Image: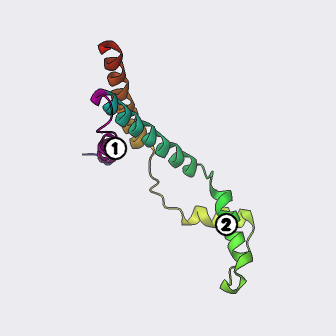
Amino acid sequence: MTKILKRILTAIFWGGLLTVLGFALRFSTGDALQNFCDAFSLTGVALLGVAGVGYLRRQDFFSGVGYALQQAKISLFPFLNGKRESYSEYRKRKEEERSDDEVSVLPCVVAGLFYLAVACVLLLAIAFLR
């Protein structure tokens, strides 16, 4: 089994746990089919949100926030002996620290789209059964 397939199956597993949790929260209220649809759509949106944050992280979207927090820590706690560095030095240091094995967002996208597709099928079933 390839590495990407293992990651996709892992994302589907965690999505399944989130779906069960979402269904359990609404178990006693309303229609069961509607509850399944809500649980699957919650999971699909959550997994796509995780993929979006992962994509932004890979694009260094949060590096400015990390730099600002580091500078605030140095200003508030000067006894920790933090050295002041420019933003370009900070980015260069973070690029060197970053591992080469970046986490791919593809598994979360695939699993999120799978759960949203199931939610759409359930939504169509609800529409045609009423």
Residue 69 magenta-drawn?
Answer: no
In this rendering, position of residue 105 left or right of residue 71:
left
In this rendering, the label closer to the viewer, 2 or 1: 1
Q: Is residue 114 above or below residue 2?
A: above
Colour scheme of the rendered structure? rainbow
Residues in magenta, as a range: 6-33
Residue 88 percent across, percent down from the top left: 72, 62
Q: Place residue 16 in its image quadrant.
A: top left
Crowdedness of circle 2 by 10 Å Cα count: few (<14), some, many (20+)? few
> Of helix, strand and loop, which one carries label 2?
helix
Which residue was labeled with disc 2?
69
Q: Residue at x 68, y 74 (%)?
A: 73
Say whether residue 35 is left or right of residue 51: left
Extreme-bottom residue of the structure: 79
Residue 89 is tagged as none
Q: Is residue 122 above or below residue 80?
A: above
Question: Is 25 in the magenta?
Answer: yes
Provide the residue designation for mark 1: 25
State left or right for residue 58 relative to residue 83.
Answer: left
Furthest residue in direction left, as rendered:
1
Q: Quadrant of the C terminus?
A: top left
The N terminus sits in image quarter: top left
The residue located at (32%, 24%) in the rendering is 122
